[in-house]
Amino acid sequence: MSRPKKKLLLRVGTFPSPSETFITLQAKLASDLGFEVFILADRKMGLEDSSQPEIMLEYDLLARTTELRRMEPSGGRQRVITLLKILASGVPLDVLRTLDYLNYGSEGLKGNYVLHYEEVRPFIDADVVHIQFGTSKYPFDALKASGLFKGKVVTTFHGFDAHFGQVDQAERMLFYSQLFKYGEAFTANSKFLEQRLIDLGCPRDKLSVIPMPVDTDYFRPLKSSTEGDEIAILSVGRLVELKGHAFGIRAVRRLMDKGYKLRYDIVGVGEEKDSLEALIAELGLQESVTLCGARSQSEVRQLMQRSDLYLMTSAVDKTGRREAQGLVSGEAQACGLPMIAFKSGGV
């Protein structure tokens, strides 16, 4: 008699997201390892929003994805009506007990734990919840604190979710306090991020450094002959200040002034598109630098395999945020590209 599959819930922000390929790959791997995989997202997107449509279709990941519907009754009367409907539908005794003010405080008395339970009722029996990005912790930190969720909670931080300035560190520490207390395990993708989490109060004995891995069967060099003397340079990343694409564009101008023949492709979309286009025009690089927009993972791999050099231009933005790992740089190196980067953050 075969044992039932263990139930794994991936708790995420937006899914699918073209830049968060690791979530799709983790869902694939967990399924291959025998887990029954489900995805709970704040925002569910369509297949056209994925850069890995083949995997999405093969593993039927959209059908396994549920969009979280927060229950936030407006006003006391509506809250009471909502709670009565939930209780009338039938709930375990443990859920009823959370209404006790003496043991569960004002959060229990207001019925917040009952509402949280109802929001994730289909997944309350999950063996493991894997939270991707600490900011997606809701509502499993509260459910663990109340004892309503019995499974394990593992949280993987990626960078921006552990960023804080001098002003908001205390606020961030409070935001994660329940998660750090009741979660079973936490992972950071670099030593740099590990220290950020420790500074926020994450227990050292629960924290492990596990970089996001690169699939070296997929990202691999291709033997090809390069014709001519033009050097093909590539950067991949959202068009935002943190990614530092302006540095790469200015570097290309200086190299071309020294006589080098270059081709620079930048893959990504974002708020700095207009300013980067203006910089390209100002420097007269319209024929040499291309903003390629969004590309699928297979298209990115092809660009890497056809390029000669990878520029990892991420530095620091005006809020002080730095790159925590820079997974794409490892993917480029797996394709055989030498990589030039700033010594910044976890890179």
Image: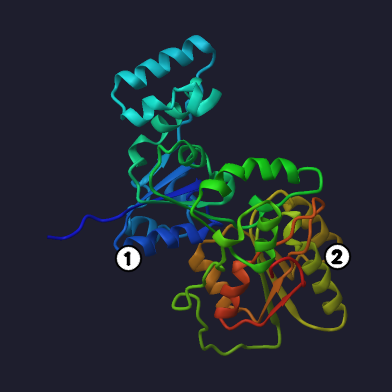
Check the image and name the residue furthest to the front. Answer: 102
For the C terminus, the quadrant is bottom right
For the N terminus, the quadrant is bottom left
Q: Are marks 1 and 2 in contact (CB under 8 Å)?
A: no
Give the residue displayed 68% in from the left and 45% down from the top: 173
Where residue 34 appears, as percent x and y from the top left, is 29, 62
Q: Nearer the viewer, mark 1 or mark 2?
A: 1
| Residue type of the residue flagged with mark 2 | Leu
Task: Tell me if residue 148 comes above or below residue 332 in the rendering.
Answer: above
| Residue type of the residue flagged with mark 1 | Leu
> Residue beneath label 2, please?
283
Q: Quadrant of residue 233?
A: bottom right
> Residue beneath label 1, please?
33
Q: Quadrant of residue 58?
A: bottom left
Check the image and name the residue furthest to the top. Answer: 77
Give the residue displayed 57% in from the left and 90% down from the top: 225
Task: Tell me if residue 122 comes above or below residue 118 in the rendering.
Answer: below
Where residue 106 appears, as percent x and y from the top left, is 55, 23
Q: Quadrant of residue 54?
A: bottom left
Q: Residues within 10 Å of mark 1 (few under 14, many from 20)?
A: few
For the residues labelled 1 and 2, the Cα–Cα distance comes to 51 Å
Where residue 98 appears, as percent x and y from the top left, is 43, 27
Camera sees residue 16: yes
Check the image and name the residue furthest to the left. Answer: 1
Give the residue displayed 71% in from the left and 40% down from the top: 171
Label number found at residue 150 = none
